[in-house]
Amino acid sequence: NALQQQGLMAKAVEAYRAAIEIDNDYALAHLNLGLALHALEEREEAAEAFDRAVTIDPSLRETLAGMGIALETAAQPPR
């Protein structure tokens, strides 16, 4: 998360992938990987990471839905 907050997305992706290699069932690592990949516009890989996160921990579905709404709203021009 610290790397993401500093805008170092490629480094964040590496760190999350390393964490996933250690524990493939670490849902938050998959979620954060998806967020970092999304920021890098790697949409397909991000979707796969989000899907894996929700498969491991279905309660993350609501978190992702909220993020999706926030991202969609932020992308719309002001009225």
Image: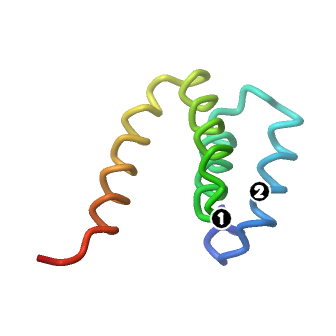
Q: Tell me if mark 1 has few (under 14), some (14-19) or many (20+) residues whose alpha carbon lies within 10 angstroms of its own.
A: few
The residue closer to the viewer here, 46 or 12, is 46
Examine the rendered structure and indicate whether residue 2 appears above or below residue 50.
Answer: below
Q: Is residue 14 above or below residue 59?
A: below
User: In the picture, which quadrant includes the C terminus?
Assistant: bottom left
Quick check: marks 2 and 1 in contact, CB under 8 Å? yes
Q: Nearer the viewer, residue 65 or 28?
A: 65
Three-letter amino acid code at the position of disc 1: Leu
User: Looking at the picture, how far across and down is residue 26, in whole percent?
Assistant: 71, 33
Mark identifier at residue 9: none
Q: Which mark is residue 13?
A: 2
In the rendered image, which quarter is residue 12 located in?
bottom right
* Viewer-closest of 73 and 21: 73
Q: Earlier in the sequence, mark 2 or mark 1?
A: 2
Q: Is residue 54 left or right of residue 33?
A: left
Q: How far across and how far down the image is residue 66, in percent?
A: 33, 46
Q: Amino acid at mark 2?
A: Val
**Which residue in the structure is indicated by mark 1?**
40
Q: Residue furthest left?
A: 79
Residue 22 drawn at (x, y percent): 88, 35
Location of residue 9 (image quadrant): bottom right
For the point 65% across and 64% down, the residue is: 40
> Position of 72 compared to 52: left or right?
left
- The residue shown at (68%, 49%) is 33
Query: What secondary structure is found at the residue carrying circle 1?
Result: loop
